[in-house]
Amino acid sequence: MPWRLLEPRRAATAARPGPTAGHKVAVDPAAEAVRRAKKLLFSPAMWRAEQQHTATTGGGWLLTALQDNLVAKPITTPHGEFGYLRIWSFDVDDHQAFLTETIRLLERLPERGLIIDIRANPGGLIWAAERLLQLFTANPISRPGSP
């Protein structure tokens, strides 16, 4: 059986030392490497688009510049049309761009319901995940001990 060695690099949008260093990062590096390797093996078109700094809309996915972190598409079921948001990773360098892009994608999805898929998400910038959670609740979320 032939072996294939894969060394998936970190995504161009992944957190780097610098402005986000003050924020807490909770990511499983091994799980992130596996996720990236699976993308290379099983979704080569998305991998090529990422490497060429372009975006792909194949499979009904909405166009997004952060396709390594999140993708979205409308799906049709026997019960109607729903939105599907797949959050691959919270490992982002710019939490504001991540939030802005999520909002933009959500605005293009059907309003009847939303499926949020975070299976095998290896984590990332905690602040990005907390800010994203704020989109789905009417009440502010605060940390213990904060006003």
Image: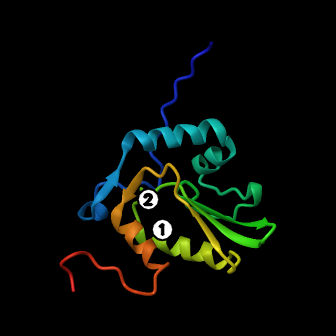
**Closer to us: 131 or 40:** 131
The vertical placement of 120 against 25, above or below, is above
Q: Which mark is residue 98?
A: 1
Q: CA distance from mark 2 to mark 1?
A: 9 Å
Q: Residue at (44%, 59%) from the top-left corner?
A: 90
Q: x, y (%) of residue 99?
A: 48, 72
The vertical placement of 22 against 135, above or below, is above
Q: Residue furthest top?
A: 1
Q: Residue at (48%, 79%) from the top-left corner?
A: 135
Q: Residue furthest left?
A: 145
Q: Residue furthest front?
A: 79
Q: Residues within 10 Å of mark 1 (few under 14, many from 20)?
A: many
The vertical placement of 45 against 62, above or below, is above
Q: Residue furthest right?
A: 78
Q: Which mark is residue 90?
A: 2
Q: Which amino acid lies under the numbered mark 2 shown in the image of this protein?
A: Phe
